[in-house]
Image: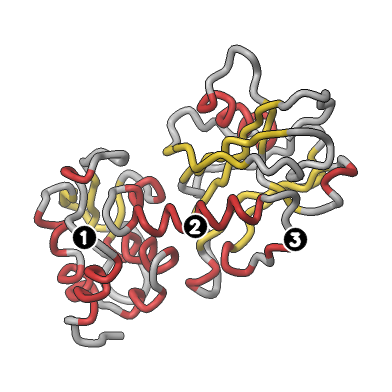
Amino acid sequence: MESNLNANAVVAVDVVVFTLRPATSIEDRWQVLLVRRDEPAFGNKLALPGVLVRAEETFDAAARRALQTKAGLDARDWYLEQLGTFGNPGRDTRGRVVSVAHVALVGSDDVDLVRGSGIQSIDWVPVRALPAETLAFDHADMLRVAINRIQAKLRYSWVAFQLLPDEFTLSQLRAVYSAILDPSLQRLNTSNFRKAFSTLFATDTLVPVGQRATAGKVGRPGELYRFVGPVGGTRTRELRWDSAARFRHNLAALPDAS
């Protein structure tokens, strides 16, 4: 967040940006964008990108501006939603600041980070390997709420496809759910993965492209698919999983496969 706070309460936005990146362990693929500011108030800790909200700005516009000015990211077409309001009077040592936190998802393949003014460093950090005490202010609380929000939405919504290219294989789709929801999903072969996600395939929101990936691991490259549903749809257009228990019940009915 920006400095030069006055005695009155001001409003800021902070943005939790999630992506998937290559990593040795599937647990480390889910990553969050963090910056290190050169202001003393940050105590050399990592922080979420954020800005103070301008008088004429919507919260949505301020969140996207934060990503542009702090990280050089054009977030106009990203999945972005409000996460919650964080207003503990002592959350910022510089003054009374209320932050409207947001969460965003983006595929990392074509994203280049550019340090903004006052930013010492900026990088992607594995979500599960991040100690809460390394984050400034109450950003650990924001991150925790964002983790719960995205894990919940993956169980009933289409947001996973925001993390994939326009055309993708089932292995790539499985990797998204494995990294964010349950690493054990990575052990499912393609046939069992299709069974576990039968509702998704039955909705015709996954359309075969009619081609195979140009490169792959050992064996024949996987068939390519395209997603044609609304990333931010309502429950009537989303997966019919009522809860995490239902999701795990579907998985438990499958034979173990490696």
Mark closer to the chain start, 3 or 2: 3
Residue 170: image location, x then y, percent: 27, 62
- Secondary element under disc 3, as helix, strand or loop, is helix
Rounded to the nearest angstrom, the CA distance separating label 1 from label 2 is 19 Å
Crowdedness near tag 3: few (<14), some (14–19) or many (≥20) residues, C-alpha within 10 Å = some
Mark closer to the chain start, 1 or 2: 2
* Amino acid at the residue labelled 1: Trp
Q: Which residue is mark 2?
A: 147
Residue 226: image location, x then y, percent: 24, 47
Q: Nearer the viewer, residue 38 or 120?
A: 38
Crowdedness near tag 1: few (<14), some (14–19) or many (≥20) residues, C-alpha within 10 Å = some
Q: Nearer the viewer, residue 126 or 7?
A: 7
Q: Which residue is mark 3?
A: 134
Rounded to the nearest angstrom, the CA distance separating label 3 from label 1 is 35 Å
Residue 59 in which image quadrant = top right
Mark closer to the chain start, 3 or 1: 3
Label placed on residue 241: 1
Rounded to the nearest angstrom, the CA distance separating label 3 from label 2 is 17 Å
